[in-house]
Amino acid sequence: MEETSPIHITGLLEQQRGFFASGITQETAFRKEALKKFLLAIKAFEKPLSEALWTDLHKSPEETYLTEISIVQQEVRHHLAHLQRWAKPDQVSTPIQLFPSSGRLLYEPLGVALIIAPWNYPFQLLMNPLVGAISAGCCAMLKPSPYTPSVAKVMEEMIARTFDPGHISVVQGGRNVNGALLKHRFDAIFFTGSPSLGKVVMHAAAEHLTPVTLELGGKSPCIVDAGANLTVAAKRIAWGKTINAGQTCIAPDYLMVHQSVKEELLQKIGKAITAMYGADIRQSRHYPRIVNREALERIRKLMLHGRIVYGGEVIPEEKFIAPTIIDEVQPGFPVMREEIFGPVLPVMTYSGIREAIDYLNQQEKPLAFYYFGKQAAALDILAKTSSGGGCINDTIMHIVNDKLPFGGVGNSGMGKYHGYESFLAFSNRRAIVTTPTCIDLPFRYPPFRYFRLLKKIL
């Protein structure tokens, strides 16, 4: 893929600054019309997007629709339904000491935004933030991942056919292009990727005091307690770990299971995987592949410690790693020291829930947290731990509800998006006080007459 030159990036940025300065994106009608065009474009490009995701990641059309296309469509529809109300100024109550003033909040777009997306969900994780940028009234420069080039090319064509480049544009390339982009001053940066690259983005943004939204990752734990419904837990863990071949930032990264139910649970997870993909998983058209050989080799090295009790097959030339369960894992193993980002599920046991809680609280705060067990116990554990989001008796599904904010905390990110939070992510909430001139109370002016009375009021 041809990389976008630094000169072209500079030209696009100037074009977008001019487009934003025209004030057209401030108009709610313009934003709604842009969202409608976006929705039509997604429908028109559904087939080429599906074909591109099959080429790059071996994603089936069904998985592509469920985890990529439908999520963005749902987000656009949600914004179209609510944008008129979100963009309207909000009146706020005014304390008595400010009488006769009134206060309100204005929602103004931040300006020109940079959105950088990863390769694992290359359509959803580039286009979902874009919905918020359009809704808030921003212009946006989009940077897809070069590791899924087929999808990147289709998205570039889709955006070029749908939007004025001064409004929305796409730039292509690897780390050199990222570096060229980050030298410029944007009005907002939205980045999805690893914590290590998130630090690079935040450092660059600090040079211009640019606000950032960082959607990162980490090792999201999955706890299965003694009181869990093991059959249901096994199916939902197997699904959450194998969708997109485990290349999901909120996949259950590792399993902590009560020792009394471990053997039964692991057997049921293995059966659930077989039920979804068949006895010969390699032949299933529903099972994706690892993005490239480099990623495959990194994951394979993580499989060298512990005892493999299910799967373990690796075929480098096909970028295939079978769903793999590794038992007898210790905290110091490499598989427990970095985010796996693949279909490998390491297993640790605990005898008392306090043991599991203490371990979780010694780690970086994860993007997601999953617990299978009784509701009362789940609420107690949630109160004693921290994560960006999560599920009780499920995995992954909290990302689907566009009325819930999605994002990390600490090492797993900062800022939220989806639904109204996406609108806010690209907006400045501008606080305005309006004071009439017909009344001009003397309390605030020197020599501060009636000061004793004012103290009583305050």
Image (tube, rainbow, N blue to C red):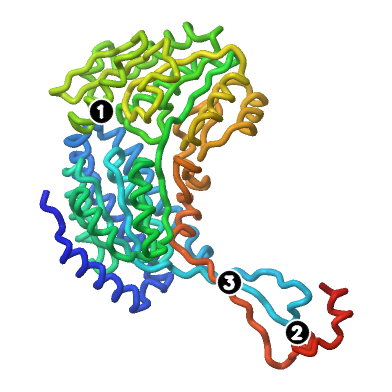
* Circle 2 or circle 3, nearest the eye: 2
Q: Is mark 1 on a helix, strand or loop?
A: loop
Q: Inspect this view and state whether residue 243 appears.
A: no
Q: Which is more N-terminal, label 1 or label 3? A: 1
Identity of the residue drawn at 25% across and 53% down: 178
Q: Which is more N-terminal, label 3 or label 2? A: 3
Residue, disc 3: 431
Q: Along the line of sight, which residue is nearer the eye, 453 or 154?
A: 453
Residue, disc 2: 444
Q: Kindly indicate whether the residue at mark 3 contacts the one at mark 2 (C-beta within 8 angstroms).
A: no
Residue 43 place in picture, x, y as percent:
28, 50
The picture quadrant where one finds residue 329 is top left
Q: Which mark is residue 262?
A: none
CA distance for labels 2 and 3: 21 Å
Q: Is mark 3 on a helix, strand or loop?
A: strand
Q: Which amino acid does label 3 sit on?
A: Ala
* Outermost residue toward the bottom in this view: 438
Identity of the residue drawn at 37% across and 14% down: 326
User: Mark 3 Cα within 10 Å, few/some/many (few <14, many 20+)?
Assistant: few
Residue 42 place in picture, x, y as percent:
28, 51
User: Mark 2 Cα within 10 Å, few/some/many (few <14, many 20+)?
Assistant: few
Left or right of residue 198, residue 225 in this image: right
Depicted 264 relative to depicted 429: above or below: above
Residue, disc 1: 288
Residue 30 place in picture, x, y as percent:
37, 70
Q: Which amino acid does label 2 sit on?
A: Arg
Depicted 408 relative to depicted 435: above or below: above
Left or right of residue 323, residue 257 in this image: right
| Quarter of the C terminus within the rendering | bottom right
Left or right of residue 63, residue 214 in this image: right
Identity of the residue drawn at 53% across and 32% down: 391
CA distance for labels 3 and 1: 48 Å
